[in-house]
Image (cartoon, grey):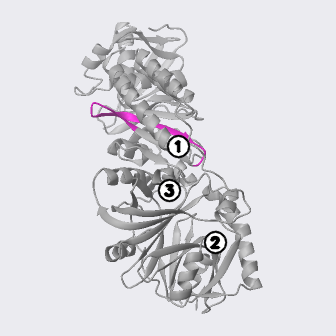
Amino acid sequence: MPLALSSLGRVFDGVFPTTLATCSASGDVNVIFVSQVHYVDEEHVAFSEQFLQRTVANLRENPRAQAWLIEPTSGVQYRLDLAFVRRETEGALVARMRAKLDGIAEAAGMTEVFRLRAALVCRVLAIREVPVATEASRATPEAQRPLDLRSLGGLADALSRAEDLGATCRALLDGLVQLGYEHSILLVTDEAGRSLVTVDSRGFAESGIGSEVDVGHGIFGRCAATRQVVRVSAMSREETYVRASRPPRARHIFVPALAGAESLLAVPLVSRDRLVGVLAVESAARAAFGEVDEAALKLVAHFAASAISLAEREPPPDAADPRSPVRIRYYEEDDSVFVDDTYVVKGLAGRVLLAIVKGYMERGRTEITNRELRLDPAVRLSPINDNLEARLLLLRRRLEERCPRVRVVPVTRGRLRLECSGPVDLEVVRSLT
Amino acid sequence: VRPRAIEWIFRSDVVVVAATATDAGVPEIARSLGLRGAGPGEPLHAYVLVPEGLTFLNLVAENRRIAVTVGRPRDYRSLQLKGKDATIVTTTPRDEAWVERYRAELGPALEPTGVPPALWGRLLSREFVTVRFTPEGAWDQTPGASAGHRLQDSW
């Protein structure tokens, strides 16, 4: 019975490089390793064209080619007899291939080397399993873990019940744990849509809450910029540690990363055509995420994007209690805030915290509404998409983690209360410029 | 004289593939258990796995054309050699010893790249056939600006 492309297990996951052979019209054979082979449909595959001048020239002269693929979970190998059909330089297929390749290349610092030039689409003429005579017992490809619909339903229910962004994030990442994804990261876009900020995570040594990634930079940034799913099955250790984040600075928080991560799946969160953020899961196992995981995460991302958008539109939070002094230092230069010499936040979240603390210091108010924050010119919120909810959640989580003596607590919808375990000593450090 | 810069292709931390084609230009791929250089200026020995390489061997016996690519997974380094005098030759004790060492060292050498050594046991057949060829040229296949360039001082 002829083999079907979709029955070849995880051959397209890129764990092993694929071998591709072509032949010129004059009979000059060329054999190379290619980094990516993509399943296009049951009759076609596509190869990533990077530095393949000879291969492309051969295919133009003689369309016949052969590929040798390895299924990573079983070691079963397949020969694909191919006929070159076309070279695509744009479109959905190229975008999908580029998102994956660019993210990895950037993380590995090899952007120019691995830049995708085109997709070489080939028709599959025949698929043959390669006969291998070994002493090792023949293994069958590992079946992909079925999607746990009950847990997925539970996650959707929990998201629909979440009353604010914090509850939404908890419902989402706790739900992912129930689905079997123990290491997850949720990043949301900033008010300008230029960067992503980690608002919650599960399963990492450091939560990384507050860490930032520029949109377009690294795996998460590429996922956001292209709005394409990025699935990596065999990330080298170097790549893992060169994870996309801004260059280290004194006030830098690192994006959470699983030590020795081999697999990563990042999905964009898009609601009504607006990029809301990126959801990613990681695993130390090679080829941990397959088609089923990709489908599951896309579904979860769809729920999550709607829930986060809704929560961002609905404001939340209130009070202080003086005793031993809490020293809060605000640096005008980058709006960073330190509490008792511990760095907490910067940027918009820093300005928000300053506004709340000033309200308390100058007017004795322990509560403030989101509306007041939006109207406060010192907070400098964008009138178009202020992203206040995400920043408030980030602020609360960072305070919980770093400075439990200061809390910003949601009281009712759209109202916050400042709670301090002592009198506040606020110092504003002016910028020199 | 074989340039020292490409001595790495004869080590055990590399993966070696070979290809030839029918007269109608249909390519056929095979895998080799490494690549042995007998000495400067001497032909090379590729160890083509069987049964997976049987069609390849039949074609090479007829047309004698061969392309061999050696890749080093840990740094993507890759080199292609081509010859037109490929011949199936009797495997000598030196060949056997070389292949035995390659088999023993390959799995551990590639483990840092994330491939479990046990998997190689399923990927590589026990049997092989020795193919001797003289490279007419070597081409850099390492991803980057020099990919596809012919090495000036090869063979």
Q: Residue furthest front?
A: A1
Residue located beneath label 2 in the image: B51
Residue sitting at x 48%, y 16%: A407
Three-letter amino acid code at disc 3? Leu
Q: Which range is magenta?
A: A268-286
Main secondary structure along the magenta-highlighted residues:
strand
Residue located beneath label 1 in the image: A289
Q: Earlier in the sequence, mark 3 or mark 1?
A: 3
Q: Residue B91 bears which disc, if any?
A: none
Label 2 crowd bin: few (<14), some (14–19), many (20+), radius 10 Å? some
Q: How many marks?
A: 3
Q: CA distance from mark 2 to mark 3?
A: 20 Å
Label 1 crowd bin: few (<14), some (14–19), many (20+), radius 10 Å? many
The answer to whether residue A332 is magenta is no
| Labels 3 and 1 touching (C-beta < 8 A) | no
Q: CA distance from mark 3 to mark 1?
A: 23 Å
Left or right, residue B104 beside residue A298: right
Residue sitting at x 57%, y 45%: A261
Three-letter amino acid code at disc 2? Pro
Task: Please give the chain letter of the residue carrying mark 3.
Answer: A
Q: Which of labels 3 and 1 is toward the front? A: 3
Position in image of residue B96 (x %, y %): 74, 79
Nearer to us in this view, B37 or B23: B23
Task: Please give the chain letter of the residue carrying mark 1.
Answer: A
| Labels 2 and 3 touching (C-beta < 8 A) | no
Dot 3 and dot 1 within a common chain: yes
Nearer to us in this view, A56 or B58: B58
SS at circle 2: loop
SS at circle 1: loop
Label 3 crowd bin: few (<14), some (14–19), many (20+), radius 10 Å? few
Q: Looking at the figure, which quarter contains the C terminus of chain A?
A: top left
Q: Residue A3 bears which disc, if any?
A: 3
